[in-house]
Image (cartoon, helix red, strand yellow):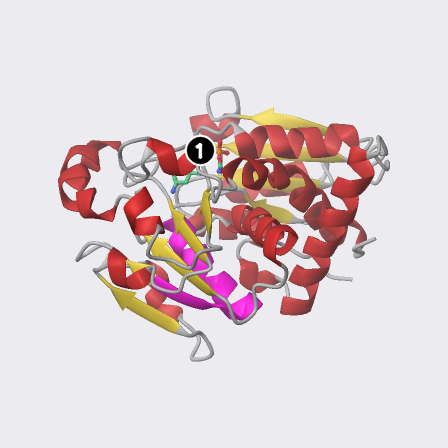
Amino acid sequence: MSVRHFLTLLDLSPEELRAVIQRAQELKALRSQGVRPAIFSNQVLAMIFDKSSTRTRVSFESAMVESGGAAIFLSPRDTQLGRGEAIADTARVLSRMCDAIMVRTFSHDAAETLAKFSEVPVINGLTDSFHPCQLLADMQTYFERRGDIKGRKVAWIGDGNNMCNSYINAAQQFGFALSIATPIGYEPSQFANVSSSVELDYSHRPEQAVINADLVVTDVWASMGQENEAEKRHELFHRFQVSEALLSKARSDVLFMHCLPAHRGEEVDAKVLEHPKSVVWDEAGNRLHAQKALLELLLHGTTG
Ligand code: CP
Ligand code: NVA
C-alpha cells in the first residue's frame, strides 16, 4: 500500500473525511468514559514547527501519548533544518526513525517536498496556504452540534488566508455553500482552483455574506509571517470584524467558529467569542480527537 499524506482536505475522499469525523466522535465519547485505546502503541510522530503553536502542538502530542505512542517536537532552532539541511534529506532520515511526520511551516511547497521524499505519512499542521487539520475539528464541531453540514451555508469573514483556502476545500468535500467576504485585494489564492461543484459567493460585504448563514467563521487579520503588515491590515479590515450585530444577521441558530488564537477587538468582538452561539472552545478541543482519527487512518488504514 502506498503511503498516504494529508497536505490538504483534497488528499482524502469525501467518504474518508466523514469516516474520520465519525471516528473522532467515537474516540471523544470513549475518552469521556475514561477509555483511551492504545491505537498508536510504540509509534512515534515527528513534529516540525517552523512557526509558533499552542493547539496544534499540544493536540498532536497528547493524541500520541494518550494512545500509547510518543511525539518529538522539532524546531529549527535546535535541528539541522535551521542550519540549512535540505527538507528532502530530513524527510528521508525522519522516515527511518518515525512512523509519521507533522509539519508546520511557511511555504506549502516545502510541505509538498517533505511528503515527496518521506516514506511515512506527512500531515500539514499549517502552511501559508492551508490548515486542513483545523477543518477536521471545525467539521466535527459542526456535526456534533447541528448534524450534517451538507447543504448548509458557511460565511467566511476577513482575510482570504490559509484557513479560508481550507474552507473552500471543505465546501467541495462536505457539500456546503460558502460565502466569502474579504477586503479588496485579500481574496483567497485557492480561487484559482475552485471546483465547479462548489457553491461559492464572493464579495467585499460581510453583511451580505452572513445572511442565512448556518456557520460564521473568521480568523486573524495578519497571519504568522505577516506581522509587518499588521498595521496596514488593521486599517483595511476594520469593517470585517465579527460583532454581535453582524452575527445577528445570520440564521437564529447560527454557530460561530474561530481557529484561535483570537485578537479580541480586531477580527472578533470579545462578546462574540463568549456568546452562546460561539463554539470556539469545543472547536479547539476537538483538534485532539479529529487528529487521533486522522492518524489512525494514515497509519493503520482504518477509521475504527
Ligand atoms: N488553531 C491553531 O492551529 O492554533 P495553534 O497556532 O495554537 O496551533
Ligand atoms: N491564519 C492563522 C492561523 C493560525 C492558527 C495563521 O496562519 O497565523
3 displayed left or right of 81: right
Question: Mark 1 belongs to which amino acid?
Answer: Glu
Q: In the rendered image of this protein, does residue 137 appear above or below residue 265?
A: below
Q: Residue, x 64% and y 34% (percent of image)?
A: 60
Name the one closer to the observer, 224 or 112.
224
Residue reaching furthest front? Answer: 252
Q: Whole-percent x and y of residue 175?
A: 53, 71
Q: Residue at x 81, y 56 (%)?
A: 302
Q: Residue 192 location, x and y as percent?
A: 33, 69
Residue 156 lies, with reference to residue 71, above or below; the image says below
The answer to whether 29 appears left or right of 123 in the picture is right
Q: Can residue 129 be seen in this view?
A: no
Quarter-of-image position of residue 193: bottom left
In the rendered view, tell whether residue 302 sits above or below residue 96: below
Which secondary structure type mostly characterizes the magenta part of the structure? helix
**Can residue 176 be found in the magenta stretch?**
yes
**Disc 1 residue crowd, few under 14, some 14–19, many 20+, Cα 10 Å:** few
**Does ligand 1 reach within 8 Å of label 1's beta carbon?**
no
Q: Say whether residue 76 is magenta.
A: no
* Residue situated furthest bottom in the rendering: 196
Badge count: 1
Magenta stretch, residue numbers: 161-179
Which secondary structure lies at badge 1? loop
| Viewer can see residue 146 | yes
Residue at the (78%, 42%) spot, across then down: 29
Q: Name the residue under label 1.
A: 274
Percent coordinates x, y for residue 269 in the rendering:
31, 36
- Tell which residue pokes out farthest to the top in this image: 78
Quadrant housing the N terminus? bottom right
